[in-house]
Amino acid sequence: MSRIAKSDGEVRERANILLVDDRPDKHVVYRSILEELGQNLVSARSGEEALREVLKNEFAVILLDVNMPGMDGLETAAMIRGRKRSAHVPIIFITADYGDEIRMARGYSLGAVDFMVSPIVPEILRTKVKVFVDLYLLAQLAKQQARERGQLAAERTARAAAERANEASAFLARASAALAGSLNLGATSRELVRLVVPFLADVGVLTIAANDDFEAKGEVVWAGDGIGDLPDIEAYAGGDCRWWREAIERVGASGKREISNPSEPSAAANDTAYSAPVGTLRIPANTKLGSLAILPMIARGRTVGVLSLGLAQSRRTYDAHLLSIAADLADRGAIAMDNALLYKEMRDQDRRKNEFLAMLSHELRNPLAPITNAVHMLGTGDAAKVEWARDVLDRQVKQLCRLVDDLLDVSRITHGKIELRFEAVDVAAVIDVAVETVRPFIDARSHVLTVTPPAQPVRVRGDFARLAQVLANLLNNAAKYTADGGRISLSADREGTEIVFRVRDSGMGIPKEALGSIFEPFRQLGQAIDRPQGGLGVGLTLVKRLVDKHGGAVEVRSDGHETGSEFVVRLPLLVDVAEGAPPELHVADAARIVPPRRRRRILVADDNIDLATSMGLLLELMGNEVRVTHDGMAAVAADAEFRPDVVFLDIGMGKLNGLDACRHIRRKPWGKEPVIVALTGWGQAEDKNRSREAGFDHHLVKPIEPAVLQRFLAEIEPQTA
């Protein structure tokens, strides 16, 4: 032990900590972890060197590697214990072989206070060493005071301090083993409060921080004297315990402990063994408690709980020794509870993943069955059946596309890759498109839909298609969870500087506990087997994230089962245009299918033979001359011979991909003439950039509906004239 002078002239003692390991890199790690304790760190790289250091100096604690060449850690510990001067120095063994029970038993027989497994968790090592340093410094202080009163008193004090240190280290070792025994939050919480009685308290109370994911009691109470488990703190303390609960709330909010020792009012304020901020607490006179310590339990920067330790009247009070142990236990308990919570979150995520995969499999199989039947009907030659099959194929393919588009939209928004085309959008036009989109579904279930557009023309700044998608998803959700013949309403009203959309239904309602998670991905009401209308559980997630992207807000209201629900979307009004100005038409509404002025030559290249052939047939029906190929090399050759006006190239073709095929065509003397269109399943920003760099004029994402294809050809006709 050494002394250092502080700036105010006070001399502060520093303890020696011996680090024994044959690897230099481990010494660097231990020093980086322990240097903030402000103590003397002494290094030894062998058992022999450690013994020489023990002969020269006293140590508060020894960190000893078990596996060293020559004299290993166990032999070194035996020789250290053989000397009276170092017989009681706490030894923490560090090993990579935690499962070697024979070595562990021998280590504990030599007086080891703990075994730590490499690699070391810095916070745990620092906390354990700090306990022994604090105890050592207290013991040294006691020795110094005792020496002033006589050698006999000094020996008794040192012996008591050593016994308390061993007792504390043994308790903390038992606590660590007990807390590590389960990853269930409830079991961990109960074990923690049982540990503190009677060693640290006569009653222990663990208040678990509010969290929707916790499946445990919010309060766990355990009392000594054979009382055991109690329902709440009132059952122990008696009377009104609002003062206690208010103190728990303060500690949970501030992260600062509060202590009351009526017989020693200044003890908490003068406590230097535990460096966390401390507040004073007054205990009412009509309670059986004499002392109370309330400590925050903090892990990864958040408070997971609050630990209350109470001592009965006329018994112990909380001194620096007990507070140091209590603080250590609270830290270990916080880590154990946080691990239990993380484990539960991991299980919940895994469960939701499995549920989602099951839903996805179910939803993809649903349209495949009627598609298979429709394909069979196409071969019958019966005109009515063929017409029916065409309708079925059209509906089911659109359903498949919707499922895939929803999944892609969630992924794009989550990763910030969605592109929104902001413009002045007429609210009434958005409502019309949304209603038109879901009208077939609503009519199929005989719902009564009431639509109330704003009284005056109102515009917002947004992406027309995405805003229509928001309202369509809400209407679709209302129709899905409302029994046949139910009532649905959509209204839009101006409220101050906002336009407020309200979608109400008379459906099954939403349980109170589900309101907070209704917008999370893949969350649905009920199990997969009782969802007659299907869906992947991403529609409301898209609503929330798209509204957020538009600077708005969405909320849900419901009084519970069979009370219906209401979704409210608020968007800022467009205020930089004249009041009453005529609404602008969205490009999708204004586009018209214009017959081509001349017969165009179109080249289609795709290695999906069915897709390429069917697209070629559609283009021929539209009055075009079409050539179809199935790889990039053939497309380049056909371009030289056919000299098309428009070229549709799939990106992912064999032999020569679409990007390289486009570059080959552009290098030809006539290569600047055709309009070249990328036709692909990849539609993110980087994909479009690659297409543009390769020489494509346009980038279309599969699948393309016939009406969209015809409208696209009409829009590019001036380029092909």
Image (cartoon, grey):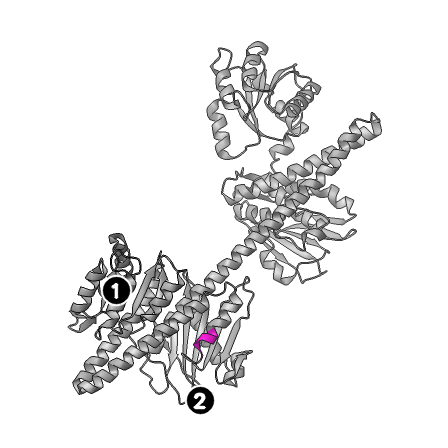
Return the disc, 2 or 1, that comes first in the chain's sequence.
1
Mark 2 in CB contact with mark 1 (< 8 angstroms): no
Image coords of residue 587 (percent x, y): 60, 32
In the rendered structure, the answer to whether residue 694 lies left or right of residue 464 reads left
Image coords of residue 544 (percent x, y): 57, 49
Number of numbered labels in the structure image:
2
Tag 1 residue: 76
In the rendered structure, the answer to whether residue 166 lies left or right of residue 500 reads left
Q: Nearer the viewer, mark 2 or mark 1?
A: 1
Image coords of residue 179 (percent x, y): 45, 67
For the N terminus, the quadrant is bottom left
Specify few, some or many for label 1: CA neighbours under 10 Å numbering under 14, 14-19, or 20 or more: many
Query: Which of the 4 quarters of the picture holds residue 630?
Result: top right
Residue found at x 61% / y 62%: 513
Magenta part of the protein: which range? 193-197
Q: Nearer the viewer, residue 124 or 410?
A: 124
User: Magenta stretch mostly in which secondary structure?
Assistant: helix
Residue type for callout 1:
Thr
Tag 2 residue: 285
Q: Is residue 30 visible?
A: yes
Kindly report the distance in space between the C-alpha atoms of the residues bearing marks 2 and 1. 55 Å
Residue found at x 40% / y 61%: 301
Image coords of residue 561 (percent x, y): 70, 61
